[in-house]
Amino acid sequence: MNAPPTSPATPRRATITDVAREAGTGKTSISRYLNGEMSVLSPELRARIEAAIERLDYQPNQMARGLKRGRNRLIGMLLADLTNRYTVEVLQGVEAACHALGLMPLICHAANEVEMERRYLQLLTTYRVEGVIVNALGVREETLRPVGGGGIPAVLVDRSVEGLVADIVGLDNRAAAELGTRHLLDGGFRDIWFVVQPFEQVSSRRLREAAFREAMTAHETTRAGAARPHTLVLDLADPEQSARSLAQLDRAIDAANHYHAGAVGNAARVAVFAANAPVALRLALHLKARYGADWQARVALLSIDDPEWAELTGITTIRQPTYDIGYRAVEFLHERIEGVQTGARDCLLPGELIVRASTSG
Amino acid sequence: MNAPPTSPATPRRATITDVAREAGTGKTSISRYLNGEMSVLSPELRARIEAAIERLDYQPNQMARGLKRGRNRLIGMLLADLTNRYTVEVLQGVEAACHALGLMPLICHAANEVEMERRYLQLLTTYRVEGVIVNALGVREETLRPVGGGGIPAVLVDRSVEGLVADIVGLDNRAAAELGTRHLLDGGFRDIWFVVQPFEQVSSRRLREAAFREAMTAHETTRAGAARPHTLVLDLADPEQSARSLAQLDRAIDAANHYHAGAVGNAARVAVFAANAPVALRLALHLKARYGADWQARVALLSIDDPEWAELTGITTIRQPTYDIGYRAVEFLHERIEGVQTGARDCLLPGELIVRASTSG
DNA sequence: CTGTTAGCGCGTTCAT
DNA sequence: ATGAACGCGCTAACAG
């Protein structure tokens, strides 16, 4: 069992030595050719090498090169959740940047499991990646020890990690939450529920919630009354907790619809501000189940993130510059790999408000 | 420019030699320890090695191991489109299987660009992956030459590649399309439009369309009339073509609603069978724009794939066993890597019909 | 049981 | 302008 592959199928790839022999020269010249040191090769030799490579379909072994020169052009990309469209879009940017910089991203998907996260981080160092981009969930400084300060360069995406100083790039959460809140206030809404997953541990969620709260308090009372902020925690991973939270929201919606019966404009509807797309989806599903297809008549839903169903449902969103986030993350990492020693940097990119029917009726 | 990293930041990882010195022994013993040949090590030496490794925080260099033994436990995973939920779900299965088999997947995202596809395939062989899982779009035998038969083992996912004999795993397209078609026919629908992206080149699309057509013809005429199959090609990448196709569909819908005014049950509504989720989304967006929020009253939408918005919209779907597809693909590949020489195998997994309001009203 | 030796495929002095 | 020799980190004979 576990026998080595019976090689007849794989004719063994050509090595640099094979090419040297084929071209009737030494390995050194081949190496030079591969590394573009053309000025040091006689046109004649160069032609022979070219031919030999072509004939043998030779392709240099990256592993061996990496071993020798100490850098293998590999970077790790640790993802918390590929199911989330945000993540995939960030990835697009990452791949583009890697392509441009001659890097190869090793993509690791932790699937929301902290254990996986640890395993992959370990695995990545094992493959001697030159740097890591981390979009993690449970990581604390400890599990990230091989990385950052003393270890290999790292840059964080979206969320910071407790006790770890590293570059971080992501949405300007403060500005985004404020943007959404003001949009709702301007639309005449007063009862606004900010719904967010447990946010103590995740910096981006924390920032959004705080900014929401702040924007609400800053708002001066108008004819339509004072702003009434509510924060609702929705733990997607815990059905019971979710049920309780949603019930609480239901009561508020019913009460508002009753109390404000006859009120003007949006003061009657309660607005719900989802901190991200997964939350928004959960809310939409619940509200539809409870209030029927016409649920949007009673609730105005606004969400950070712009899922593919947003257009279909007509909900207003704040789109994150996901692609840029990924792209910038790689650029930062690349600089670190090249030896930049600056202190930890932040790169906060602005979100874009996309107004749809949900908040403009 | 392009200076090597100023190493002070990276204290250089410990090597096997360091550990040997630290433990006061030779490299061989360390190697043996690493490979679990415990029975050949005195408990005393073993303890010393353990301690040394711990002290130096040593982690073997996979690159070097791979170089030596000729297998690096890396496999390539070439993806056509990570934006597609199908792909991501397949990926979950792939990662799980890799984890179980001690493989490390190198994920490459071609983002629907044939050129990328080529580049990545080339890159993968450069890293000497032991095998490749391919879910590609434009690949023809030619660009896949380094792979398959003479090259490294490959297994295809979802679609076959012209002229390339290799294992393939995916949905049982024939059965799935038939399942959906019969469901619609049983529901009383007679005018059924099968909407699919250009399918000449993509085997799975071709199979679905053929099976749809077949199921329609096989259906015997009933009280509700004869089955009227229509195939509509929708090129998502070509706005003009899309517009024309959608207009054609619109005319059919209008005509049917007019002609059958007063007919019983679903014979009046036209049913639209989307060949996959991207098509379904495009259709839903268009229909909503044209017929308003109540579009489902005039059209019954059914789709292969089960996107996250399906539940929200209440459309019936045929869910693919995506996770299993990914898992099986890796298992197949693993067998090939271990030297299995059987002829090309097919693994067709069944889809699951999820009935929702769209086809049961 | 344990250490020595010789490469894996490649890049890099250092001669020539 | 070119090639020989050494070593990257590790495994695999082959001795002891």
Image: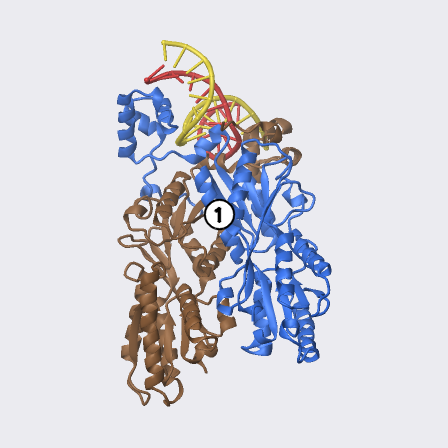
Chain colours: A brown, B blue, C red, D yellow
Q: Quadrant of residue A68?
A: top left
Q: Quadrant of the C terminus of chain B?
A: bottom right
Q: Residue B288: image x %, image y %?
A: 57, 75
Instruction: Give the residue drawn at x 61%, y 60%.
Output: B180
Q: Residues within 10 Å of mark 1 (few under 14, many from 20)?
A: many
Numbered disc total: 1
In the image shown, does B349 or A141 lie closer to the viewer?
Answer: B349
Q: Residue A197: image x %, image y %?
A: 34, 63
Instruction: Give the residue drawn at x 52%, y 61%.
Output: B307
Label 1: which secondary element: helix
In the image shown, does B11 or A25 lie closer to the viewer?
Answer: B11
Q: Residue B88: image x %, image y %?
A: 50, 53
In the image shown, does A1 or A17 lie closer to the viewer?
Answer: A1
Mark 1: amino acid: Gly
In screen coordinates, is B205 left or right of B328? right
Instruction: Give the residue drawn at x 50%, y 68%.
Output: A309
Q: Answer above or below: position of B63 versus A164.
A: above
Residue A234 seen from this side: no
In screen coordinates, is A304 left or right of B229? left
In the image shown, does B297 or C7 lie closer to the viewer?
Answer: B297
Chain where mark 1 sits: B
The residue tagged 1 is B93
Q: Quadrant of residue A226?
A: bottom left
Q: Quadrant of residue B244?
A: bottom right
Q: Answer above or below: position of A182 versus A19.
A: below
